[in-house]
Amino acid sequence: MAHVEVIARATVRPGQLEGFKSQVAEIIRLTQERDTRTLRSDWFISEDGTACEVHELFADEQGLIEHQMHIMAARTVLFRDYASDHRSTIYGEVSEQFLGLVKERMGAAPTVYSFLQGFGQAATV
């Protein structure tokens, strides 16, 4: 399983939904224009507009690193002005070096799950 999947969650700050949506559109634009290894980037918003969940899929860890570099400035604006309470979970193999960088930049390391077993693939024991 070379792919790396990320599910991130955030809270939309009160009164900032329109700015949040605008900044998300900018992040999607940058992702589409610059990323070469991002396979999916889907953003979901709760019915009341107070919570967001992002589902992203990357070809590999390098794709995740590339993506982070491309959206860094726009993501900084998102969390400075429109969102808070960022949490993320990574599904797949990522290096300790990468986790250290994420912790340094985001203040907390994401939760990481390694692949165990799925259809057509035996568990590694």
Image (spheres, grey):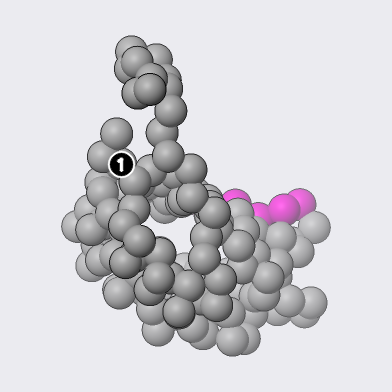
Q: Quadrant of residue 95?
A: bottom left
Q: Which residue is mark 1?
A: 3
**Which region shows up in magenta?**
43-47
Residue name at image x 61 percent, y 74 percent: 20
- Local SS, label 1: loop
Give neighbour class at mark 1: few <14, some 14-19, many 20+ (Cα, 10 Å): some
Q: Quadrant of residue 91?
A: top left
Q: Is residue 38 above or below residue 13?
A: above
**Quadrant (top left, top right, bottom left, bottom right) of the N terminus:** top left
Magenta span: predominant SS is strand
Residue name at image x 65 percent, y 75 percent: 83
Question: At label 1, which amino acid type do we have?
Answer: His
Residue name at image x 76 percent, y 52 percent: 47
Residue name at image x 47 percent, y 68 percent: 25
**Quadrant (top left, top right, bottom left, bottom right) of the C terminus:** top left
- On whether residue 46 falls in the magenta region, the answer is yes
